[in-house]
Amino acid sequence: MFFMKFYNVIRYIFVIVQKHTLYLIISILLFESGFGQDLKKEDTLNYFIADYKLFSSFDSVVFSNLDGFQFYRPFGKRRLPIADNGNLGLAVHSLLAQSQSWNHNHIIGAYQPFILSGDSMKFFKASNPLTIFNYANGAEREQFFTVFHTQNIGEGLNISFRYDKINSQGFFVRQQTNHSRFNSTYDLQSRNKRFQSRGFYTINTIEALENGGVFISDEEGGESTAILLAINMFDAQNRSRSREVETLNSYGWGLNDRGERMLSIFHRINWTKSSRNFENITQSSNGYYSDFFIDTAATFDTMSVLKFTNQIGVGIMDKLHAFYEFVDYNYFQNFILNEDLFTDYIGFSYQDSLFDYQINAALRKGLSGYYKEHFNFDLGLNSSVFKGFQHSFNLSLIQAVPDYLLTRQRANNYYYDIALENSTSLKVDFSLSKLEWNSRLSVSFENYSNYIYYDSLVLPSQFEGEIQVIKIQAQKSFHFWRNIHSINKLVYQFISNDEIIPLPNWLAYHSLYYENVLFKNSLNVQIGFDYSWTNSFQAYAYDPAMAQYHLRNGNELLSGINQLDFFLNLKIAKSARLFFKYENLLFPNYDPKSLRVENYPTPGRAMKVGLSWRMVN
């Protein structure tokens, strides 16, 4: 019976694919040959990408890769399962234990993964102007649209911009999301390489209705749908916005044979503002919130953090950079709290190669002001390929001062002052990979002191002691009979106190697919299955008013994750890619075994369709 149902599902998928995409594929092929877009050979199109560091080096990048194309969501690119509140755009968190920064963006809460910030900025160099359109569509009006463009202007200037639109009506009652993200960047270098400049602007708008979780009504039975689900909140919503603009300029003297500047000075200015508004007009009839402190009739909370950074520094050989920076903060909440704070920092960064190792080191230390006890140090060693093996070592030590708004709230549902000590995290990881074997193994040790978390009352708390986390991650790819491919990733994480960090011990991802090139290399096809799994775990609950995940009251374990997806990826010529994905084949519209967050079911079977179009001038 199961195999007959499975066969009918697969047959239905192919009928849909054939019905709705045959004309599209033919149109694309005709468009490719008749429109006259001169797509050159792949090896003549050179694109390079750099992270946002102090004039970091560029690495080559390919924009038309088909591997993993079916992962359309803007996070979770490591293929491992994640925990979310349902449809695209709702609150989300990683299932891997990690240190918490609790910086100024923490007021955005569990919507932070959707934010494009300075840390995520990329800079490009392009041999040809490049434009990419991505679009994904699914059930319940779930949509994700992206447009990206980059081009060089003249010899030394590159500009890029990106716009994302994320929205979904929601699989369950009152879970509609509507997000938009935009960023633009520039990278400039003078012909004599003495002057360099980088900058970016980004704005993120997050809008989500909150239902406080859903549960099965006692009066209803049988297979449940969205109509049969009762809700805790009837008109609540979160709105967040993050804006950031920055420019980094440098001028140097004394170029050597490698084009490095013997001495340089640089100046960086950054302006950032993060804000969140939570509104709940109608008080919950079932006591979802116990009290209202400011408004007696409704909840309308507004908070924001404005940060201005002014940094100046000196560089030697374009390898060692030392800097001083002054940061001014303004914290605002509901016209009750309006506080100006400042902190000045010193730091350095170093990038070089020694004995076939790429060395990256950075240090930042507070000197005075509210965050004067802040300290972070990072060290990375990455080897080149030696006898087919490549290995890396990374060390990170952070002492973080809790953010000002983390320790005090002047909101309708949470009104408190809580003293928190500085938290410290130490992370050491080592990885070993071999390209010929398509394998990678990494081991990490993490130690958290004074770990900060939200307890079952949704109040910031601190574990007075240390928590150790050991993670072992293994990844291996196989090729069978030339056209059969398998990608496997397995993670084991040991958490010394899983009552404070209630995450699974085992996470796994497996992909099995067939790949081939057809029609004289004009069509590349991948068809197969993705499977994600975790063991049972305690998991988190979610609080809409704070937009934070917190500990649960109950002791029962959630059943873990067991998700099977079918996908079909197509690459037509060099410019068009399509995917068809049928998610969560193992569960219907709702199943208690699908919970990843308390009272927030995972949507059942749903069809997704995506298109990516690359245009090169």
Image: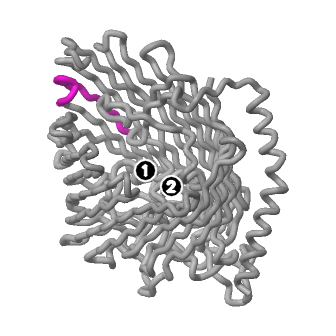
Q: Residue furthest front?
A: 481
Q: The residue tagged with tag 2: helix, strand or loop?
A: strand
Residue at coordinates 50% horizontally, 82% vertically from top-left?
559
Labelled pair 2, 1 in contact (Cβ < 8 Å):
yes
Residue 613's image quarter?
A: top right
Quadrant where the image shows the N terminus: bottom right
- Label 2 packing within 10 angstroms: few (<14), some (14-19), many (20+): many
Magenta segment range? 307-322
The x and y percentages for residue 596 are: 51, 73
Q: The residue tagged with tag 1: helix, strand or loop?
A: strand
Residue at coordinates 32% horizontally, 32% vertically from top-left?
56
- Label 1 packing within 10 angstroms: few (<14), some (14-19), many (20+): many
The x and y percentages for residue 223 are: 73, 84
Q: Which residue is mark 2?
A: 301
The x and y percentages for residue 394 are: 23, 52
Q: Which residue is mark 1?
A: 333
Quadrant where the image shows the C terminus: top right
Colouring scheme, one of rainbow, by chain, secondary structure, one colour: one colour
Front-lying residue, 475 or 389: 389
> In the visual, does 114 lie left or right of 514?
left
Front-lying residue, 525 or 251: 525
Magenta segment: does it hold 317?
A: yes
Which label sits on residue 193? none
Residue at coordinates 24% horizontally, 62% vertically from top-left?
420
Q: Does any portion of residue 572 appear in the rendered image?
A: yes
Sequence-wise first label, 2 or 1: 2
Amino acid identity at mark 1:
Gln
Residue at coordinates 26% horizontally, 17% vertically from top-left?
259
Amino acid identity at mark 2:
Asp
